[in-house]
Amino acid sequence: MSRFLAILLLSLSLFELAGCSTEQTVHAAIGFERTLSGLDRNHAEIDGHTVYYLEGGSGETVVMLHGFGGDADNWTRFSRHLTDDYHVIAPDLPGFGESSRLPAASYGVRQQVERVRLLLDQKGIDKVHIGGNSMGGYIAAWFAATYPERVKSLALFDAAGINSPTLSPVLKQILDGGSNRLIIDDPARFDDFLQLIFADPPYIPGFFKDYLAQKAYGNSAFNRKIFDELWSQRLPLEGELPKIKARTLIVWGDQDRVIDISSVPVLQQGLKQVETRAVILPGVGHVPMVERPAETAKAYRTFIAGGA
């Protein structure tokens, strides 16, 4: 959902006037935004999967993991504020984005942790700053607990995995046997999805929104497979938190309707053995790095640089 930069609207119009298809226009716009952020698209063969990832900048390595149904471009605008001083890697986790979807493979948290490790091993990278949003935060925290010697810092952006004291509207609806609003099983529901993850949904040109809605709908069956696997495993993060040795930043939008903000004190209690900082962003939903990329990146940069 990070592809809605206002500066692109003129470029989009020009591409449309040039007679490009909608898909060509969207890909051109996404490529332009990546270029502005200093990111290139690469791929690697990992655990039988072709894994695509964005990479750019130099310095200490920052690894950012997207949430359920997302992709590496969820971090593109956020990364624009990092690549001058840090080496950023943001993968399309297997099963999402342009990375491969293998029906017989498992996409549980432990398996995704191992794929992140294999990617870093293949690139010869030892220690990293790692963070993630929602499902990606769940995976990042599990990585930090499993490989504490490889983690310089951890960042959790509205992270999943905690049994929050207050259920979010999304989780309550799922537990009550209702529909899962995170899965787009009808393109007409895409606006509802945007209202769900953003406190203030951005303007998206109609043809761009239609493209994204159709793409999300096309992936809905596989997304349901992955969600059902994650849901059936139900691996609580609370028991892993004491294993984490890295200083940790917790960022949460106070209008998050997907994972309730009551998860924050649970995380703080579980991480009492390390230095933690919590940043609550007012008027922000489930994806702060998309909704407020500059503000979120500023808080993150300050933290990993050792500031308060």
Image: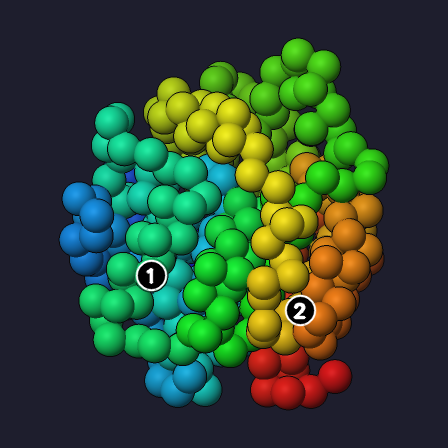
Where is residue 274, by image quadrant? Answer: bottom right
Residue 229 visible, this angle:
yes
Q: Which residue is mark 2?
A: 249
Q: Nearer the viewer, mark 2 or mark 1?
A: 1
Describe residue 115's horizontal placement relative to residue 143 as left or right: left
Residue 23 image point, x, y percent: 29, 39
Residue shown at 45% from the left, 44% from the top: 109
Describe residue 298's horizontal placement relative to residue 144 as left or right: right
Q: Using the image, determine if residue 3 lies above or below residue 174.
A: below
Q: Which residue is mark 1?
A: 117
Q: Using the image, determine if residue 282 lies above or below residue 207.
A: below
Mark 2, Cα crowd under 10 Å, few <14 / some 14-19 / many 20+, is many
Residue shown at 35% from the left, 57% from the top: 116
Residue shown at 63% from the left, 27% from the top: 192
Residue 232 image point, x, y percent: 52, 25
Q: How many marks?
A: 2
Residue 27 image point, x, y percent: 30, 49
Mark 1, Cα crowd under 10 Å, few <14 / some 14-19 / many 20+, is some
Amino acid residing under circle 1: Arg
Where is residue 268, by image quadrant? Answer: bottom right
Amino acid residing under circle 2: Leu
Q: Earlier in the sequence, mark 2 or mark 1?
A: 1
Residue 159 image point, x, y percent: 62, 50
**SS label for mark 2:** strand
The one nearer the camera, 240 or 198, is 240
The one nearer the camera, 171 or 16, is 171
**SS label for mark 1:** helix
Where is residue 301, by image quadrant? Answer: bottom right
- How far apart are the alpha carbons under marks 2 and 1? 21 Å
